[in-house]
Protein backbone atom coordinates (compact mmCIF):
# COMPACT_ATOMS: atom_id res chain seq x y z
CA UNK A 1 0.00 0.00 0.00
CA UNK A 2 2.97 2.30 0.55
CA UNK A 3 3.33 2.70 -3.22
CA UNK A 4 -0.30 3.58 -3.82
CA UNK A 5 -0.72 6.71 -5.90
CA UNK A 6 -4.05 8.49 -6.25
CA UNK A 7 -4.85 9.36 -9.88
CA UNK A 8 -7.65 11.73 -8.87
CA UNK A 9 -10.27 9.92 -10.88
CA UNK A 10 -12.85 10.84 -8.22
CA UNK A 11 -14.53 7.44 -8.12
CA UNK A 12 -14.17 7.07 -4.36
CA UNK A 13 -16.16 10.32 -4.05
CA UNK A 14 -18.84 8.89 -6.37
CA UNK A 15 -19.19 5.67 -4.42
CA UNK A 16 -22.54 5.46 -2.57
CA UNK A 17 -22.47 5.54 1.21
CA UNK A 18 -21.70 7.77 4.12
CA UNK A 19 -18.88 10.28 4.30
CA UNK A 20 -18.63 10.68 8.06
CA UNK A 21 -17.75 14.07 9.53
CA UNK A 22 -16.75 14.66 13.12
CA UNK A 23 -17.55 17.78 15.12
CA UNK A 24 -14.00 19.01 14.67
CA UNK A 25 -14.19 18.45 10.91
CA UNK A 26 -17.52 20.27 10.75
CA UNK A 27 -15.94 23.27 12.49
CA UNK A 28 -12.97 23.31 10.10
CA UNK A 29 -15.03 22.91 6.93
CA UNK A 30 -17.60 25.48 8.03
CA UNK A 31 -14.84 28.00 8.79
CA UNK A 32 -13.28 27.33 5.38
CA UNK A 33 -16.61 28.01 3.70
CA UNK A 34 -17.30 31.10 5.82
CA UNK A 35 -20.35 29.53 7.43
CA UNK A 36 -21.39 28.83 10.99
CA UNK A 37 -21.18 25.16 11.99
CA UNK A 38 -24.95 25.16 12.45
CA UNK A 39 -25.55 26.45 8.92
CA UNK A 40 -23.05 23.98 7.51
CA UNK A 41 -24.75 21.07 9.27
CA UNK A 42 -28.14 22.21 7.99
CA UNK A 43 -27.02 22.68 4.40
CA UNK A 44 -24.45 19.95 3.81
CA UNK A 45 -25.00 17.07 6.21
CA UNK A 46 -27.56 14.46 7.19
CA UNK A 47 -27.82 11.99 10.03
CA UNK A 48 -26.27 8.60 9.38
CA UNK A 49 -28.74 5.73 9.32
CA UNK A 50 -27.81 4.64 12.84
CA UNK A 51 -28.46 8.27 13.90
CA UNK A 52 -25.16 8.37 15.72
CA UNK A 53 -23.27 10.76 13.49
CA UNK A 54 -23.31 13.06 10.49
CA UNK A 55 -22.52 12.35 6.85
CA UNK A 56 -21.94 14.76 4.00
CA UNK A 57 -24.90 14.81 1.64
CA UNK A 58 -24.84 13.76 -2.02
CA UNK A 59 -25.59 15.72 -5.16
CA UNK A 60 -28.30 14.80 -7.67
CA UNK A 61 -25.95 12.24 -9.24
CA UNK A 62 -25.39 10.48 -5.93
CA UNK A 63 -21.84 11.81 -5.64
CA UNK A 64 -20.41 13.62 -2.65
CA UNK A 65 -21.73 17.18 -2.65
CA UNK A 66 -18.17 18.55 -2.65
CA UNK A 67 -16.91 16.65 -5.69
CA UNK A 68 -16.15 18.79 -8.74
CA UNK A 69 -16.39 16.65 -11.85
CA UNK A 70 -13.35 18.25 -13.41
CA UNK A 71 -10.48 16.42 -15.06
CA UNK A 72 -8.76 15.49 -12.81
CA UNK A 73 -11.51 15.42 -10.20
CA UNK A 74 -11.24 17.96 -7.41
CA UNK A 75 -12.65 18.30 -3.93
CA UNK A 76 -14.03 21.70 -2.94
CA UNK A 77 -12.94 21.16 0.64
CA UNK A 78 -9.70 19.34 -0.08
CA UNK A 79 -7.64 21.11 2.61
CA UNK A 80 -10.17 20.09 5.25
CA UNK A 81 -11.69 16.94 3.82
CA UNK A 82 -12.79 14.39 6.41
CA UNK A 83 -10.41 11.74 7.71
CA UNK A 84 -12.52 9.07 6.02
CA UNK A 85 -11.56 10.55 2.66
CA UNK A 86 -7.88 10.61 3.60
CA UNK A 87 -7.99 6.99 4.71
CA UNK A 88 -9.18 5.47 1.41
CA UNK A 89 -8.00 2.92 0.32
CA UNK A 90 -5.28 2.15 2.89
CA UNK A 91 -7.42 2.18 6.04
CA UNK A 92 -10.82 1.39 4.61
CA UNK A 93 -12.13 0.25 1.25
CA UNK A 94 -14.93 -1.89 -0.14
CA UNK A 95 -15.11 -5.20 -2.01
CA UNK A 96 -13.93 -4.70 -5.57
CA UNK A 97 -12.50 -1.25 -4.90
CA UNK A 98 -9.48 -1.97 -7.10
CA UNK A 99 -11.77 -1.97 -10.16
CA UNK A 100 -13.19 1.45 -9.27
CA UNK A 101 -9.97 3.15 -8.22
CA UNK A 102 -7.63 4.32 -10.96
CA UNK A 103 -4.70 3.77 -8.61
CA UNK A 104 -5.90 0.33 -7.62
CA UNK A 105 -3.63 -1.57 -9.95
CA UNK A 106 -0.52 -0.14 -8.32
CA UNK A 107 -0.63 -2.23 -5.21
S1 LIG B 1 -15.21 15.47 0.86
FE1 LIG B 1 -13.97 15.64 -0.96
S2 LIG B 1 -12.58 13.87 -0.89
FE2 LIG B 1 -14.28 13.47 0.52
S3 LIG B 1 -15.80 12.32 -0.66
FE3 LIG B 1 -16.33 14.49 -0.79
S4 LIG B 1 -15.35 15.22 -2.68
FE4 LIG B 1 -14.39 13.29 -2.10
S1 LIG C 1 -10.74 6.17 -6.59
FE1 LIG C 1 -8.55 5.94 -6.16
S2 LIG C 1 -7.45 7.05 -7.79
FE2 LIG C 1 -9.61 7.69 -7.82
S3 LIG C 1 -9.64 9.56 -6.55
FE3 LIG C 1 -10.14 7.82 -5.19
S4 LIG C 1 -8.19 7.14 -4.31
FE4 LIG C 1 -7.71 8.44 -6.08
Image (cartoon, rainbow, N blue to C red):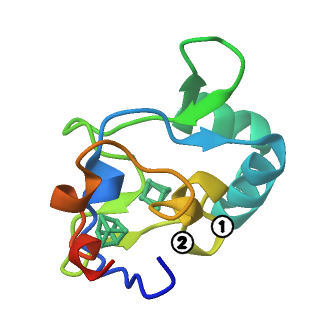
Residue nearest the observer in this picture, 91 or 62: 91
Quadrant (top left/top right/bottom left/bottom right) for the C terminus:
bottom left
* Quarter residue 57 falls in: top left
Between the residue at mark 1 and the residue at mark 2, the CA separation in whole angstroms equals 5 Å
Q: Position of residue 104 (x, y in %)?
A: 26, 70
| Residue picked out by circle 1 | 80
Q: Residue at x 28, y 65 (%)?
A: 10
Element under disc 2: helix
Q: Can you tell me whether the CB of the residue at mark 2 lies under 8 Å from the nearest atom of ligand 1?
A: yes
SS state under label 1: helix
Nearer to us in this view, 89 or 85: 89
Instruction: Report x, y in % for residue 56.
Output: 52, 39
Q: Please say if 92 is above or below 73.
A: above
Residue 78 tag number: 2
Residue 83 horizontal side relative to residue 78, left or right: right
Instruction: Answer whether labels 1 and 2 touch (C-beta < 8 Å).
Output: yes
Question: Ligand 2: which quarter?
Answer: bottom left
Kindly identify the residue that appears in the image at 29 percent across and 44 percent down: 15
Amino acid sequence: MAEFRCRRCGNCCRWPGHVHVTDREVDAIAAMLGMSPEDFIEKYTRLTEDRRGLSLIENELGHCIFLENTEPATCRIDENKPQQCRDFPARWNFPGWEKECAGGGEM
